[in-house]
Image (cartoon, rainbow, N blue to C red):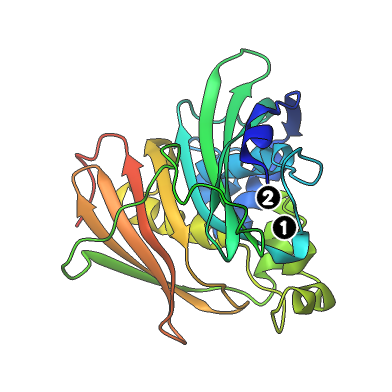
Amino acid sequence: MNPELAKKHQPPPETFSYTIRDAVLYALGIGSKATNLQWTYESDEDFHVFPTFVIAPALLSNSLGDWPGVKFDLTRILHGEQFIEIFEPLPLDGDLLSTVRIADIIDKGSGALILTDINISDKRSGKKLAYLQMATFQVGGGNFSGAKNSSSAINGLPAPQRSPDKIVEEKTSKDQAALYRLGSRDMNPLHIDPMFAQMGGFKQPILHGMCTLGFSTRHVVETFADGDARRFKAVKARFTSPVSLGSTLVTEMWKENSRIHFQTKIKETGKTVINNAYVDLIDDKNSKL
């Protein structure tokens, strides 16, 4: 790994085109039901794109395979942390422009934590729509005499030391990853190909971390924003453990003004799979407890 070389590289912007159908398919991929008309029925008066769909153009632009200064192995890459901030609601369809840069590479010894900054704008209007920071852990990529931390990192926050205000449980499908990969366009074979998953050290394909985060974010929006994802402002999360297909997700939530802290566990095993996480909402005066 060569952080200084990686930070200097600036690839050209990528264009991401999508339709309403793509947005609906993504919503179904994160567990939305037919009754969630605001995300699944284009003629509903409140129809809007679920905001974490913005991960799709971000993934398109975040291709590290040929990035100068980065040693990349798809079979040994893990999604470590994710931050998303939305500035304007995503258009129902259209063309998005994404620009990407590596903010830093942190030497964790057992691996390298690659911090990638991605800015998303509307290609037609030029409006800035979103900013994302993705922290990707490359197993075995550490010990390159690099820094152990970075001022560029957006850090998460621990949950409050009290009982959760709300808890939502929801079982995922054995086919969840197969559906999510289409809506998100995250085609990593780790989530569909048993042989590839075994090469990565897993017994079977696992759920995308961003699918788990999509479920949890939806739980927060349904619980504290009356199902209106237009009130979503930002989310930060740390992925701590893989999720087996068919697992039951338990999202524990704590409300502190317009910030909802949360963590996600697997009911069957008790393992925490997301922590240090929060969602920021716009105007929380109608939020429920």
195 vs 51, nearest the viewer: 195
The CA span between labels 2 and 1 is 5 Å
Q: Which mark is residue 181?
A: 1
Question: Residue, x 58% and y 66% (percent of image)?
Answer: 110
Residue at position x 48%, y 68% in the image: 240
In this rendered view, identify the residue nearer to me: 201 or 244.
201
At which x and y percent is residue 144? 62, 53
- Looking at the rendered structure, the secondary structure element under dot 2 is helix
Q: Is residue 157 left or right of residue 19?
A: left
User: Looking at the image, is 123 positioned above or below residue 246?
Assistant: above
Q: Which residue is mark 2?
A: 184
Residue 186 seen: yes
**Could you tell me the amino acid type at mark 2?**
Ser
Q: Which amino acid type is shown beneath numbered disc 1?
A: Arg
When asked about the image quadrant of residue 67, the answer is top right
Which residue shows up at 62% across the image and 40% down it? 3
Q: Position of residue 161 (x, y in %)?
A: 17, 66
Verify CB contact (< 8 Å) between mark 2 and mark 1. yes
**Quarter-of-image position of residue 229:** top left
Q: Give the left or right position of residue 230, taking residue 58 as reference.
A: left
